[in-house]
Image (tube, coloured by chain):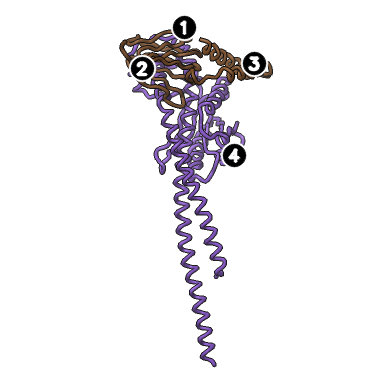
């Protein structure tokens, strides 16, 4: 039976924890709004880009385009870009992305393919390191980034292209969490190289007769690398919003759990206090009766 | 003059969207002007100034490369970065130019050298835009 003092201390410490989780939840809520705005603001560019690309890609004969579009004809080496958060305490956010990537990596390895992993974000690296020490080629940390800007995503995109040009891998897939709502973030795998477009758009765009300056291939050549960066940027933005959403809901339930615990502990505290008073009274009364 | 729809987007956000009368675009193969009912075309853009004329007045913005897409729906510019000319600061650009020049000399690998050269060209274009 814990003493009254122990109980009091425990209640105080849970209360302190609750204050922290509450504060974290509110901070996450504020950051979430900003992240969501940023994700929404970036949407027009990515959409236009996709429309333009689908348009040109539709006009080009399959398999004839640049390697970024049609691949290099092999699929032996797969690069998995795993985007996670830099910080924990956000529920299952990091582990669900890592789980998806791990499943993919295992199934690729079972097929006898080579897997390479590039981690963006420290948490994913920490989790993957245990199992795939040899496969991880690099860790990119974005800890210092407060508000995700295109200049943060661009170097990653360039790196991916440089590695592809050096023949380091054949297929590139990026893993991140798509933001649906505060309580729902969907871990997603998106193939970056070779690029994939919705078929319907390509068919619709092919009818327009376009003038290309400098040339169709020239534009495609400068547009495709850019598209990779844009896709990475988009994934990072979605991820940032998802992270804050996940943190907000997990901190919300943590606050609620702390509240429940305080309630329970307070009842125990009051009961044992009452029991002690009763015991003392009985002692006094029985002592008086004995006289 | 008849108006058409013009959109200027950067990766981070939609910078401008609305009806305009005329846009001058610094295409990679020469400057071109887009008016209403321009034939569909697509062009890459070199660093330079786009001039937007609308019913309410004219506007000049510096773009750091990107793409222009003219379709039946209007003109869309996907810019890497767009800054209103009024926000550019000569002193700052000059300071950056000097820093980049040093980078070029210090560059140890071809890749970093190339990146620095590219940056210098962009800064030089920015500087030239201000002297218009």
Residue positioned most to the left: B2
Viewer-proximal residue, A259 or A216?
A259
Label 1 chain ID: B
Q: CA distance from mark 4 to mark 1?
A: 51 Å
Residue B101: mark:
3
Q: Are marks 4 and 1 in contact (CB under 8 Å)?
A: no
Residue A80 percent across, percent down from the top left: 52, 31
Q: Disc 3 to disc 1, how far (Cα)?
A: 27 Å
Chain letter for the residue marked with disc 2 in the picture:
B
Tag 2–tag 3 contact (CB < 8 Å): no
Of all chains in the rendering, the one displayed in brown is B
Q: Residues within 10 Å of mark 1 (few under 14, many from 20)?
A: few
Q: Which residue is mark 2?
A: B56
Instruction: Name the residue at 45% across, 49% down.
Output: A252
Residue B29 visible, this orientation: yes
| Circle nearer the N terminus (2, 3) | 2
């Amino acid at each position: 039976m814990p003493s009254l003092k122990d109980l009091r201390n425990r209640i105080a410490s849970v209360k302190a924890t609750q204050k922290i989780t509450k504060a974290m939840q509110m901070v996450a809520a504020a950051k979430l709004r900003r992240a969501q705005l940023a994700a929404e603001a970036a949407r027009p560019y990515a959409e236009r880009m996709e429309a333009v690309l689908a348009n040109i890609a539709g006009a080009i004969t399959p398999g004839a385009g640049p390697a970024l579009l049609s691949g290099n004809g092999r699929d032996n080496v797969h690069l998995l870009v795993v985007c996670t958060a830099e910080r924990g305490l956000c529920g299952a956010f990091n582990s669900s992305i890592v789980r998806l990537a791990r499943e993919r990596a295992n199934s690729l390895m079972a097929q006898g393919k080579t897997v390479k992993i590039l981690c963006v974000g420290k948490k994913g690296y920490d989790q993957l390191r245990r199992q795939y020490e040899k496969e991880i080629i690099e860790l990119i940390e974005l800890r210092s980034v407060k508000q995700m800007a295109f200049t943060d995503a661009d170097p990653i995109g360039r790196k991916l292209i440089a590695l592809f040009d050096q023949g380091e891998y054949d297929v590139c897939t990026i893993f991140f969490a798509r933001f649906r709502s505060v309580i729902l973030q969907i871990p997603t795998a998106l193939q970056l190289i070779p690029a994939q477009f919705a078929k319907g758009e390509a068919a619709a765009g092919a009818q327009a007769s376009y003038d290309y300056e400098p040339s169709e291939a020239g534009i495609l050549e400068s547009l495709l690398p850019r598209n990779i960066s844009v896709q990475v940027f988009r994934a990072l933005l979605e991820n940032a919003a998802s992270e804050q959403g996940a943190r907000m809901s997990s901190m919300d339930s943590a606050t609620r759990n702390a509240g429940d615990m305080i309630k329970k502990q307070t009842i125990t505290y009051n009961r044992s206090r009452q029991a002690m008073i009763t015991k003392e009274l009985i002692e006094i009364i029985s002592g008086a009766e004995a006289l | 003059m008849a108006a058409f729809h013009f959109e200027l987007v950067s990766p981070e956000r939609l910078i401008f969207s609305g009806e305009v009368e005329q846009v001058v675009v610094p295409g990679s193969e020469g400057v071109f002007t887009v008016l209403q009912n321009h034939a569909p075309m697509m062009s890459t853009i070199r660093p330079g100034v786009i001039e937007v004329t609308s019913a309410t007045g004219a506007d000049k913005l510096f773009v750091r490369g990107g793409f222009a897409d003219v379709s039946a729906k209007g003109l869309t510019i996907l810019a890497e970065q767009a800054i209103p000319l009024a926000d550019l600061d000569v002193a700052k650009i000059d300071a950056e130019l000097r820093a980049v020049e040093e980078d070029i000399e210090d560059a140890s690998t071809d890749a970093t050298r190339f990146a620095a050269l590219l940056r210098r060209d962009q800064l030089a274009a920015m500087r030239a835009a201000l002297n218009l």
